[in-house]
Amino acid sequence: MSDMHVSAAGAATAGASAFGASAFGDGAGAGEHPNVTLLKDGYTAFAKGDMASIRGLLAENVVHAVPGRGPLCGEYRTPEEVLGFYVRLFELSGGTFRAEPYAVMANEEYGAALVQTYAERPGSPGRVLDGRAVDLFRIEDGKITEIRTLAEDQYADDAFWS
């Protein structure tokens, strides 16, 4: 099994263990795997709406799978489709959609982020998405080739976006 490097908000740097941890947002800490930094950079770019930076992290053959039955569920199979999905999240939420990771981990091939999500639907007072999700990643040659977003409450997620 490959070593997994973990970054969690508020975690102290782990010395010489097989796991590296640093506070999220402090840059590459001692023992932090480069793919942890890659994923953090992606979330930072997402928070800023920086689609050009996100595009630079995606492989040409990227697939972002979003399970469920809502209108945004499905597979997005090119960088342009993935970016279009992200733009749609912002459009449908009136720019309020946030995906804030509170733990990021990765090794040479795989990554995962535990994420707090939040959004509001414009024109629908009280219609709020406030939940958790797990984003799973496959990474090859420093590029993201696969993303799977798994909502903690898929029914609530589907209802919010419908």
Image: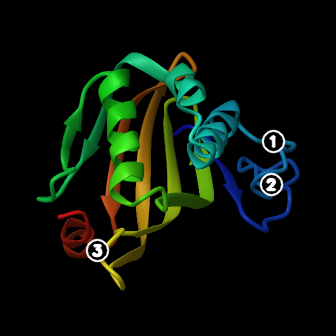
The 10 Å Cα crowd at callout 1, few under 14, some 14 to 19, many 20 or more, is some
Residue indicated by mark 1: 31
The structure residue drawn at horizontal position 54% and vertical position 30%, both measured from the top left corner, is 54
Where on the picture, by quarter, is residue 122?
Answer: bottom left
Q: Amino acid at mark 2?
A: Ser
The structure residue drawn at horizontal position 37% and vertical position 39%, both measured from the top left corner, is 147
Labelled pair 2, 1 in contact (Cβ < 8 Å)? yes
Q: Amino acid at mark 3?
A: Asp
**Apparent side of residue 85 relative to residue 108 in the rendered image (left or right):** left
Across and down, in percent, residue 151 comes to 33, 64
The structure residue drawn at horizontal position 16% and vertical position 58%, both measured from the top left corner, is 68
The residue closer to the viewer here, 48 or 105, is 48
Disc sitting over residue 22 in the figure? 2
**Apparent side of residue 52 relative to residue 12 in the rendered image (left or right):** left
Residue indicated by mark 3: 153
Across and down, in percent, residue 17 comes to 78, 50
Compare marks 1 and 3 and give the one earlier in the sequence. Answer: 1
